[in-house]
Image: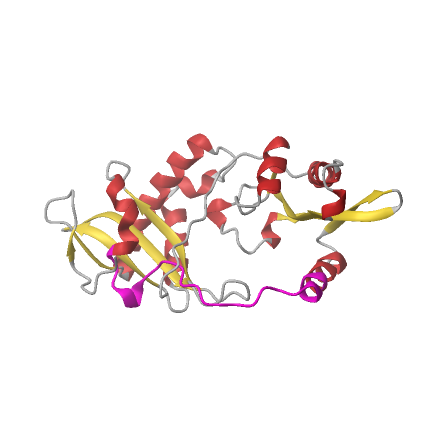
Amino acid sequence: MTSQNPERTFWPMSGAHVRPFQAGDVPAAGALLAARHRAHRLSCPLLSPRYENDQAAAAQVAAAFALPGASGAVAAAGDDIAGFVLGAPKDSPVWGANVWVVRRAHRADLPALASLEVELPRQHSLAPVFSASPVPSYEECLAGWEKDFDDPAYTTFVAEVEGAVVGSSIGCPLEKAGGHPPLTRPDRAGFLAFAAVFPHARGLGAGRALGEAVIAWTAQAGYDCVVTDWRVTNLLSSRTWPRLGFEESFLRLHPVIGY
């Protein structure tokens, strides 16, 4: 459900309401984000400790609010902010037009604020809005792979069976991965950017070998850890990467609206 009214009574705080995010909310939102980051690092200690600082976190909130088309909301009671959410339009050749939630946090003692987005007016909705978009062709995928192959920041590995290439993987600095904003990036991290094996060669250990090659390259390059991400519905990845030591740190969720 999406409200058409930007002012909503918000339980469980007596007298609380949801209103649009304003520039003056940045310091308080930064303090909330820093507190959330401190709590997150208890389970994911590889995340950077720098954003446990209120000022550093507030700078990230300010940067998100300054994005073109950004909008957001806060749950407030008087001068106190209990939670906030910020988002901005983000076009994608795969997903189509959508709005991306770039920053959010709420008081740990008020878990109900986790659903803050649904209280926003529809014109400010921060749920990703997906439109029909064509699936990339084989030629487009190959062109992307070749572009990465030619980039000196990327290191490419191939797996061969009886002299024939059956798969490949790519490693690079995590900073090259645009989908990882600063709060989600460990310091000194490499990125397993890509790995795939032809169907006929699966089950032979090629995928594991490709993943291990990127992990070994990451260590040799002086990084402290490796990051990757995949769709959990990709069952092959969901089995392979945890077996190599990857642990869950973030979940990416989206509702499809407008259909």
| Count of numbered labels shown in the rendering | 0
Observer-nearest of 24 and 145: 145
Q: Is residue 87 left or right of residue 164?
A: left
> Which residue in the rendered view is the most extreme toward the front?
200
* x and y, in percent, of residue 183 in the image: 46, 46
Q: Quadrant of the C terminus?
A: bottom left
Rendered image quadrant of residue 31: top left
Q: Is residue 100 visible?
A: yes
Q: Is residue 106 left or right of residue 255?
A: left
Observer-nearest of 24 and 3: 3
Residue in the image at 58% along x and 41% along y: 235
* x and y, in percent, of residue 165 in the image: 82, 49
Q: Is residue 171 visible?
A: no
Residue in the image at 42% along x and 30% along y: 42
Give the magenta-colored segment's residue range: 119-142
Q: From the image, give the main secondary structure of the stretch colored magenta.
A: loop
Work out whether 136 lies above or below 112. Answer: below
